[in-house]
Image (cartoon, coloured by chain):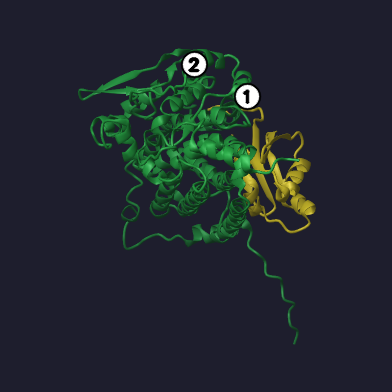
Amino acid sequence: MSVSAEPRPVGVDLQENEENRALVEAIEADNEDLNIRHMPGMIRLTKNGRLVINQASVEARLGRPWETHEFQLAIISYFGEFVEWDDDQIVIAWNH
Amino acid sequence: MTVPAQKPVRKLSMKQRYSALTHDLDWTPTYVTEEQVFPHTTFEGIKVHDWSKWDDPFRLTVEAYNKYQAEKDRRLYAVLDGFAQSQGQLGLTDARYMNAMKIFLQGIPIHEYDAHRNFAYLARYANGPGARFAALCQSLDELRHAQTEIHTLSHYNKHFDGMHDWHKWSDRVWYLSVPKSFFEDALTAGPFEWLIAIGFSFEYLLTNLLFVPFMSGAAFNGDLPTMTFGFSAQSDESRHMTLGLEAIKFMLEQDEDNLPIVQDWLDKWFWRGYRLISLVAGMMDYMLPKRVMSWKEAFELYFEEQMLGGLFKDLEYYGIKPPRHVDWAIGEKEILSHQVYWILYQYSHAAAFSTTIPDAEDQAWLEQAYPETWPVYRDTVWNKAQRVMDEGGRYFNPGLPQLCTVCQIPMGFTEPGDPLTQCQRQSVYEGERYDFCSDGCQWIFDREPVKYRQSWLPVHQIFQGNCGGPTLPDVAAWYGLQPGDGAEYLGSPDHQNWLAWHGQAPQEG
């Protein structure tokens, strides 16, 4: 069984609205080489390897507490796997 | 006496909460055997050694589920209400846009309800607590989706034709047998096959193609309710995708013997799902007045890049190969929407949506999106359809089409690499001949002929005298169609109303 070595893209589609602005900014700040594509009503963020969402980064921009469960209100779709979903962090990556 | 300072109550971590409220609430039965409590999880041949290995990466608890679902509904119903109150239907790009929504709203809500029922069944009959709780959440989600779609439809039904009898049509009308046969095929499979069919193949592999570009298209065409229920449903869908992925990985990790069974189901349900969403291809490229992306582009982005380039590289680790017949699907991406919409166009006199010839603006878009293939269809079919219109007629196919026994779409697909030769495959089973649109559908039949020989094929049913009578008016009456529901869009009541609404609107500035 082969395991591919090169990083493959993962990504997430979010609703593009005022509620999610801080979240998108936090993802932009915490993920280098993020690709961004705007479509009507939504924003698509993709990146090679791992995409990270940090609770602290979102809270700093939002100015209020934000629990990672709240990400469920923003997400439309994703590709990759949620390899981590904890109180402080969500990580999307491929497992193999 | 000193009073110790009160320590702040330490909250459980997300992991601990999830574990405490799902896995820890499970118990091992002692008065009865596990087989007696969960009698349906062995007959399909899937071997499971340890159900506790099934986890939900979302770590969702009932408390978090209720809290966030309530918030989603609050936001959604505020939008639906605002749209109705402000007469939002007047702000759509065009009334013909509604035809795409009609197909969606006639064909899908009832099957959201089917999914609700079957996930409720899994919430009882899956052996592991992780699987049961994730299935319970999905069951409630699917019920919510059916409700929000019906709620959206109820406003449009006040202003447009083609909405009033969606429930009855879903059981009777020819093109709605396509989604109906798909979901009922899955409902009548065992629990593990259901999880691969709906959880994995439909939700993870293909549902992005249905919801994301299409709902973004709704946003682009002024359809606020559809955009909002679509994206709201899709936020649940992310959890459903996760459940589907968890299901396939769980089966593959539990026992090596599961691999060939899972691969077979994956091959079957990829093709079933792909043929089902070919209706979306026709809707995206031909029925949206303003388009976000072409079917071909969406297929490349959401299927080829994400799934073939990402997911299947991951599943390779377990020995899973990309679905059988995937190359056929890739080969069709340039022609699929042209063929599907031509089918819809020529039979829309017996449908609850209307169609029209692509206008100059549509044609310019089609030409840049499909420079190779659009001119072929323009020259072979649309120019002829236009000549008929110019002479005061409207081309409808007067005959009844032959349907593919498996996908139930009229036979209008072509041989690979040859867009002008119709593809026709046949299998004989116990002396009866069955016909198929493609190798994919034939392969599915040949695997389970005893199942598919029972297909309720709308055209066969008409010929057998089960649909109100032999003529088109007989069948239309039995379907419950009313004048204005189908046929040509130009001059239809929807079109005339649209012109009247805007003619009466105050002139701009």
Q: Secondary structure at mark 2?
A: helix
Q: Which chain is green?
A: B
Q: Which residue is mark 1?
A: B361
- Circle 1 marks a residue in which chain? B
Q: Are marks 2 and 1 on the same chain?
A: yes
Q: Mark on residue B387?
A: 2
Q: CA distance from mark 2 to mark 1?
A: 18 Å
Residue A59 lies, in percent from the top left, at: 76, 54
Q: Nearer the viewer, residue B56 or B471?
A: B471
Colour in which the image shows chain A: yellow
Seen from the viewer's position, the closer of residues A41 and B246 is A41
To which quarter of the image does residue B220 belong? top right
Q: In the image, residue B174 lies at what x, y percent?
A: 37, 33
Residue B59 visible: yes
Task: Tell me whether circle 2 and circle 1 mark residues in contact (CB < 8 Å).
Answer: no
Q: Amino acid at mark 1?
A: Glu
Q: On the image, which quarter does residue B81 sit in?
A: bottom right
In the image, is residue A60 above or below residue B255? below
Which of the two residues, A1 or B198, is positioned nearer the viewer here?
B198
Taking the view exactly as shown, the residue that stands out farthest to the left is B431
Q: Earlier in the sequence, mark 2 or mark 1?
A: 1
**Can you give x and y, in whole percent of width and height, for residue B370 in the image?**
59, 19
